[in-house]
Image: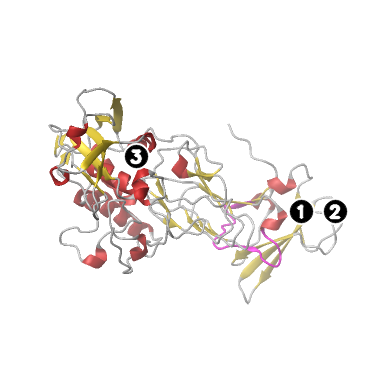
Amino acid sequence: MRTTYEHNSYNISTDQQTRIAYKNKVKEEIAKEIVTEYTLNGRKQYGMSTRLTFSFTHPTDKGMIHRLRGNLISLFSPLQTLFAEKLMQSWSDVANISYSKSSGDDDVNIGFYNFFQESSLAGIAHFPNHSKFGVVNINRFYGSNNSPTYLNFGGHVLAHEIGHSFGLIHTHNLKNTPKHQQHTQQVSIMSYRSEQASGADYGKFTPSTPQLYDIAAIQYLYGANMNTRTGDTVYGFNSNSEREFLSANVASDKLIFCVWDAGGIDTFDFSGYSEKQNINLQEMSFSDVGGLMGNISIAADVVIENAIGGSGDDKLHGNETDNTLTGGAGADQLWGNGGNNIFRYNRTSDSISTRPDTLHDFKSDKDKIDLSPILFGSSGIALVDRFSSSDQTEIIQKYNEIRDITYLMIDFDNNVHETDMMISLIGKHQLTTNNFIVSPQLTA
């Protein structure tokens, strides 16, 4: 793999028309540029579902590609086999590709093999041709190829070669495209260019599942899988996605993924991280999560409704739908960006007077602040000019004309002149009790 470091950011404007134009470009232009004319269904048979048979036990003489003759060909190890099946599932999640595994000498579309060659060639694969047996070959000379994971070079190589076998081409050397505009691994695992060339930074880690442009391309070839995660799915911590690469369990877990999700009310939960994060729910956007930069993205036609930040000073950006944004601890900055939004607080320490959260575009006619996790079992709230010893939680609103900020000072424990919690709202606001949620919302 060769890396360069020119700047070529994939972040796009929040302007709706600009984003629509970019989405159309990705789906109608870029996706078509990064695929071969052959699919697993035949020549130029685009947009059709496919079913293929793959094998890890086919005779090794079938694994000979002309460039590898004379090199030692061997079968995959159990570890390689297990991980290859997981990667095949990650492609099947986003496109209409179904599989069966052959254990005999049946007709096989793709066979997986190792080879050994002391060279820069980490892997090689056939492009699809429905009349021929296809091969994915992995070079055992590279140690990580023998123990692939979702974040190491070996996992990336295997995912990259599987992409070729489905019909995806390299995205770093497209014809009629200047070098500085060639795509990076931030948007495609089919690229040799580092994500750092486009302003992202994955540290020592490497993506090994379909990224933004890969998903658009594979869906152009085989159609989008609209049965994937149609329920209410959580990504990150507390995940119910049933996919390792979409889940985190401890703060040291790193994530690199582009999410494909076909429905439901979905959540990005990055609550377990302490680093400053920039979490963006806009379609086709990128987020900086868990100490990495540009490592989380959202595929075209995907809606993620909710976001949960960690204990650092996070930035959370909603989208046009109804979002629930939870900053967590730290001096967070939150933007609803349209919709009927809820800004949720689980504890008083989430926004304290010395380091309050800032709500940048709060709309008092439709947005709400959810205090119910803190107020559970209490007698409600009162909007007051000064704190008293009332049994109710009291909220003072104070507008600073010089700063153009409305401060909400909240006293939960009835101690006079004590602010337990403070929230800043950009602009002049006069909230009513209707702008606050004081008891848990019921769901069907």
Q: CA distance from mark 1 to mark 2?
A: 9 Å
Q: Earlier in the sequence, mark 2 or mark 3?
A: 3
Q: Nearer the viewer, mark 3 or mark 1?
A: 3
Residue at (41% x, 40% y) in the render = 261
Q: Circles 1 and 2: CB distance less than 8 Å?
A: yes
Residue at (43% x, 51% y) in the render = 256
The image shows a total of numbered marks equal to: 3
Residue placed under numbered mark 2 in the picture: 390
Q: Residue furthest bottom?
A: 402
Residue type at the position of mark 3: Val
Q: Say which of 364 and 393 sits in front.
A: 393
Q: Position of residue 15 (x, y in %)?
A: 39, 61
Magenta stretch: give its range.
351-369
Secondary structure mostly seen in magenta is: loop
Q: Secondary structure at mark 1?
A: strand
Q: Earlier in the sequence, mark 1 or mark 2?
A: 1
Q: Is 361 a magenta residue?
A: yes
Residue placed under numbered mark 3 in the picture: 94
Query: Does residue 242 appear anywhere in the picture?
Result: yes
